[in-house]
Amino acid sequence: MLGDAYLAIVQFVEQGGNVLYLIAALTFLMWTLIFERVWYFTNQHKTVVSEATDLWEGRPERRSWSAHQIRDRIISEAADRITGNLPLIQTCVTLCPLLGLLGTVTGMISVFDAMATHGGNARSMAAGVSMATIPTMCGMVASLSGLFGSTFVKRKVDFEIELFEDHLTMDH
């Protein structure tokens, strides 16, 4: 059973070309970063907010211009920690279809090579056509899956930053 699945994956990658390894590695990286952000929100986020809030609440006065600047710095530092690697996740989502396009180009080169060596033989061109379409499909599927994950993380990041900004009061 497991051997059959492995064999099917190997055959699929052979049909799609070596670009599929790049797409798989990028997808793995993207989802690792998404899961890291989820882990952050479940385990570390409360500590980050608590430390920043304690730093602000420990100030004797909070109304002067310098206090406003310190508040902005605290919010900025916390926002950086909350955002984490979200820009890298979004970059991975963007790169997946581009790598699929790279696979399309390499597949089309194989088609043109087959046409040059074997003429218009449909069988010789079929491998190149599958090598051109499979990476495109894989890049799009990887990008769409990452889009769902990155949208979830982005909404959570935006919500938590806004909540944190509202939480730091300007009293005293």
Image (tube, helix red, strand yellow):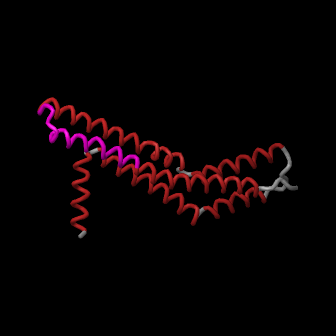
Q: Main secondary structure of the magenta part?
A: helix
Residue 133 percent location from the top left of the image:
30, 43
Give the left or right position of residue 6, taking residue 23 as reference: left
**Where is the C terminus found, in terms of image quarters?**
bottom right
Residue 152 percent location from the top left of the image:
56, 56
Which residue extends farthest left? Answer: 118
Which residue extends farthest top? Answer: 116
Which residue is at the front of the view, 57 or 90?
90
Task: Residue at 36% x, 51% y: name it.
Answer: 25
- Disc tally is 0
Please say if 124 is above or below 63.
above
Report the span colored magenta.
Answer: 118-140
Give the left or right position of residue 72, taking residue 100 as reference: right
Residue 134 percent location from the top left of the image:
30, 46
Please say if 115 is above or below 86.
above
**Where is the N terminus found, in terms of image quarters?**
bottom left
Residue 119 lies within the magenta run: yes
Give the left or right position of residue 90, taking residue 172 as reference: left
Residue 34 percent location from the top left of the image:
49, 56
Which residue is at the front of the view, 150 or 118?
118
Give the left or right position of residue 103, taking residue 51 as reference: left
Residue 160 lies within the magenta run: no
Task: Residue at 15% x, 29% y: name it.
Answer: 116
Task: Residue at 64% x, 52% y: name it.
Answer: 158
